[in-house]
Amino acid sequence: MSNRQQKHKEHIQAFSPFRHRMHEIIFEAETPLGKWFDIALMFLIIVSVLAVAIESLPGLSENTKHALYVLEWILTIFFTLEYVMRLYVVYRPIKYATSFYGVVDLLSIIPTYLSLFILHSNSLMIIRALRLLRVFRIFKLAAYTQSGNFLVKAIKESIPKIVFFLFFILITVCVFGSVMYLIEGGREDSAFDSIPKSIYWAIVTITTVGYGDISPTTGLGQFIASFMMIIGYAIIAVPTGIVTSEMVTGRKEPDEVQEVLAEACMYCMKEGHESDAIHCKYCGEELNPVHNRIDNKEDAL
Amino acid sequence: MSNRQQKHKEHIQAFSPFRHRMHEIIFEAETPLGKWFDIALMFLIIVSVLAVAIESLPGLSENTKHALYVLEWILTIFFTLEYVMRLYVVYRPIKYATSFYGVVDLLSIIPTYLSLFILHSNSLMIIRALRLLRVFRIFKLAAYTQSGNFLVKAIKESIPKIVFFLFFILITVCVFGSVMYLIEGGREDSAFDSIPKSIYWAIVTITTVGYGDISPTTGLGQFIASFMMIIGYAIIAVPTGIVTSEMVTGRKEPDEVQEVLAEACMYCMKEGHESDAIHCKYCGEELNPVHNRIDNKEDAL
Amino acid sequence: MSNRQQKHKEHIQAFSPFRHRMHEIIFEAETPLGKWFDIALMFLIIVSVLAVAIESLPGLSENTKHALYVLEWILTIFFTLEYVMRLYVVYRPIKYATSFYGVVDLLSIIPTYLSLFILHSNSLMIIRALRLLRVFRIFKLAAYTQSGNFLVKAIKESIPKIVFFLFFILITVCVFGSVMYLIEGGREDSAFDSIPKSIYWAIVTITTVGYGDISPTTGLGQFIASFMMIIGYAIIAVPTGIVTSEMVTGRKEPDEVQEVLAEACMYCMKEGHESDAIHCKYCGEELNPVHNRIDNKEDAL
Amino acid sequence: MSNRQQKHKEHIQAFSPFRHRMHEIIFEAETPLGKWFDIALMFLIIVSVLAVAIESLPGLSENTKHALYVLEWILTIFFTLEYVMRLYVVYRPIKYATSFYGVVDLLSIIPTYLSLFILHSNSLMIIRALRLLRVFRIFKLAAYTQSGNFLVKAIKESIPKIVFFLFFILITVCVFGSVMYLIEGGREDSAFDSIPKSIYWAIVTITTVGYGDISPTTGLGQFIASFMMIIGYAIIAVPTGIVTSEMVTGRKEPDEVQEVLAEACMYCMKEGHESDAIHCKYCGEELNPVHNRIDNKEDAL
């Protein structure tokens, strides 16, 4: 064990039982209290997201606006306290603060404070919706069962192939977009007035979205657009085929699936430890030293 | 057997043969008469749905309107009688009245009566279309064969995974919608005039529907929209992969498939009993006590 | 062999060698001449379809119109002769005349004659495009190889399941369409001005086509539309899953695949006979009696 | 070995070591320098494509236009030198010049020179984007691993079946397009003003793009359009099923996969040689005679 790790371990063991307990409630979803905390948090985040969305509606009365303003500040103060608490109880504050959830947690409280100085910046609060991704952690035990597990694995393994496929699509839309710019762009009042816009049109078309804000008007343009649509229609089969074949194949190896702990390592913040793990498989530190300490005490009695 | 069950059984055994026979015709599709009843009912429902649809067309003559009005009332009275009959012959009227089909049956007759008091409420009659779902019961014997059976099973098993996936999509559209509101919303006459509307746009885009009633006009907006479309194009592979892999895998276990009775338990209204079942697998009551009683009588002769 | 069959056989054996030869050329794609005839026919059909399409363009010069008019008549007369020839050389004229291709062949020559009496009826000539489906017969030998065979089988087996699925979709769009009519229809100038039109909108939406000619404008309408799009996005997985699972499963039983003759039975017009078949598997008549007669002659020499 | 081949071999062996080395850098991605050259080239191509795209934007300042003009010429001169170098170091200049990449390389420099004579022709420079397809060669080692290899194979095997499917779609859109022309085309100001345009609409609809620039307005037209959308929605399952079943099946035969060289045969320009190949499997010539010669020299020392 390195000197830094040793020092870090001492730092954690010096935590008060209260701090350990708060860590369990805030960061884990294993205990009933921890689960309730997460569910309450989800609820408040949803309320907050709805408030931001409603506030943006035109034609609200002054009273509603005021109520939403107050609600916004109450929730922001709560989330600020929660963020400070998270920093206080976490075993590695810097690791947490720079993790995905740590950054999202911070970003979701800043906009309200910013709105004191900059107008409309509170719309940015919608980033709070990203905090809802934590829901996957709460229901992790359910999702990481036999089937859920192979699903996530199949999607992960599909990503590099799909990225390659999207790169190919990107070249295709660049070429088609430019061709359409040459064909349609010359005319007065044509919507194809630049190559980037024509590429935008090509993406709208090949993905079969088809807004219709830009659409070919010449015969030749319509012919090339038709050709492109049919290509788009046929190649949508490729990503589907990739994901499906990964899933079907992944399924056929139903190797022993371990139940997964809904608990992150308190040293490196990584999740996904199996239920019989005592040490973190990423950093080697003990998982749940508090529990273990308590268990040991009970053993000693 | 509990006291309540005992009482219920006595209640059913006290049914007149006529009532038993009507039960068989109305609720079952096993006998020729029962099948004809169901087919005739389907036909009347389709006529009724078409009548409601036609009535809503602008520019009808007074005569047509009157004819449709009469037809509507005739059908409603028939459906009302049918509903009363169902309540009379069913073994557990409350269970039926609160089941999905029971509620739909009731809701499909109320609007006509309501239209005496409230204008235009008869458009709600279209809810009768839901009664057509019964068609699956009529053709159940055909559909629940080897392949149909695993199909329904595969779809059912896919639903929780797809719900998780849709939750992820929902967070994505909230974030993208709000970002577009910030980018596009500031301009005069922009269609992105509130966050809910921007989220609506994001859903229209990610599902590749693309009405074009709202579409980005700034370069940055179009860039982000392009990004989103490509994401939508790639991730449509996920639900498809889920369902397909369920189907392919489900198929590989063609375990013994039992023929399924087109007959509901007359105590708990549940369906899907295997052809050799004598007792309901859900509530334990005897299936078809009338048939059995008759059979027993015949045995006794 | 029944009396009618006996009579029919005698009728065929009375055919002149020329008639037998023409039958081979026109109806079969086995011999080089038969293949060339089919390819030439395909070419003329494409020319004819293009001519009809070009004729409909606005702003053509009088000269072009006249040239197309002449071309149209030349091709029609050729197709008429071909049709008469088909009737003459086929072994069962009535069977051919009432078969799919027979009806298409007739329908594709009528519009030109009709245009002498009724204006614009020659646009119906486009039905000639359906004759191009014969291309599958020409290339049948290639397509009916191991993989092509199981593909057609997989699609055929998927159809009943997909029809059931589409029935479910139909009920869904009826209900959603009517709900939208109630929500959006009341307003002045709303595009949802009748239930059929609202159902049309629902189909446009659930299939993710999304023209945008009709789109919800109220908040509630947009909310329900969003809900519907997400449903449409998720359930597109169902038909895909059905077809794919059929294909994957069908593939796993690569039982002995027989080469298939590109030749129809000359008695019952049915195709798909295996290469070693001597008698039609549908009607029991001898396949290719001419070839056999010639072969027998050669054997006799 | 033929006389021509003999002559060609002598021609290559007469190459200076510098020429051999340049060949390695420019045409291969095996050596570090060769890889860096390819990456730098990709970067310059992207810069060039972006420059062309930006130049097409309306409302650029004169300074920006001038800077882009200078950049364009610098890059074109560099690409010209690169093209000349390729011709110089390649073992079969004509083979290269007429290969896909050779033609693309030439086409991507011509437009700039053409723009001296013809206005706006420099938009054609966007064809440079096609050069980015070379990226697959750089990352080939990664892509051609076990999974990537079977992916490309699965897609290739799907193509003939999908082409057949698209042919079927083409006939369908022709027939539906013409029917819609007959139904909708007669009215004043109808968007269905010719058969080709109606076919374009049918393609826009069946592929679920749905711009909405052309959409049916009559009841019958909307009914037929609905029918077509539902068909399009159901049959998208076919290409997906084809590709997926190819992928799932291809996967099940994970036969020994050879590492693939990122190096083209210098005689016939073909790629995809296995890592232990000494001779090109397409033309039989020695692969990498320079390496071998050097190796032999080292052996001799």
Image: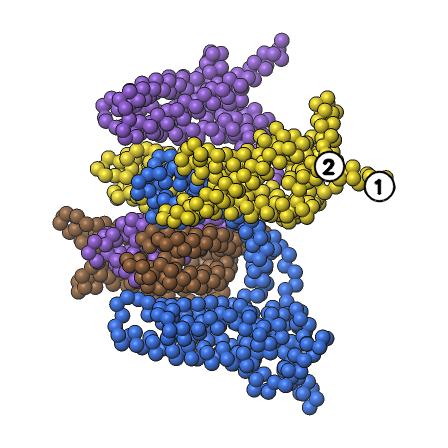
Chain colours: A brown, B purple, C yellow, D blue
Residue at 59% x, 87% y: name it: D17
Given the current orientation, which residue lies at the most extreme bottom position? D301
The residue tagged 2 is: C17
Disc 1 and disc 2: Cα gap in Å? 19 Å
Q: Amino acid at mark 1?
A: Asp
Comparing marks 1 and 2, which lies closer to the viewer? 2
Q: Is residue D98 above or below residue C17?
A: below
Residue at 56% x, 24% y: name it: B278
Q: Is residue D270 above or below residue B252?
A: below
Chain bearing mark 2: C
Q: Nearer the viewer, residue B27 or B296?
A: B27
* Residue D3 visible to the viewer: yes
Which tag, 1 or 2, sits closer to the chain's start?
A: 2
Q: Secondary structure at mark 1?
A: helix
From the top left corner, tell me how far across and down residue C29 is, in percent.
66, 44
- The image quadrant that residue C257 belongs to is top right
From the top left corner, tell me how far across and down residue A133 is, in percent.
37, 55
Dot 2 crowding, Cα within 10 Å, few <14, some 14–19, many 20+: few
The residue tagged 1 is: C299
Q: Is residue B138 above or below residue A146?
A: above
From the top left corner, tell me how far across and down residue D146 is, in percent.
59, 63
The quadrant of the rendering that contains the C terminus of chain B is top right
Chain bearing mark 1: C
Q: Amino acid at mark 2?
A: Pro
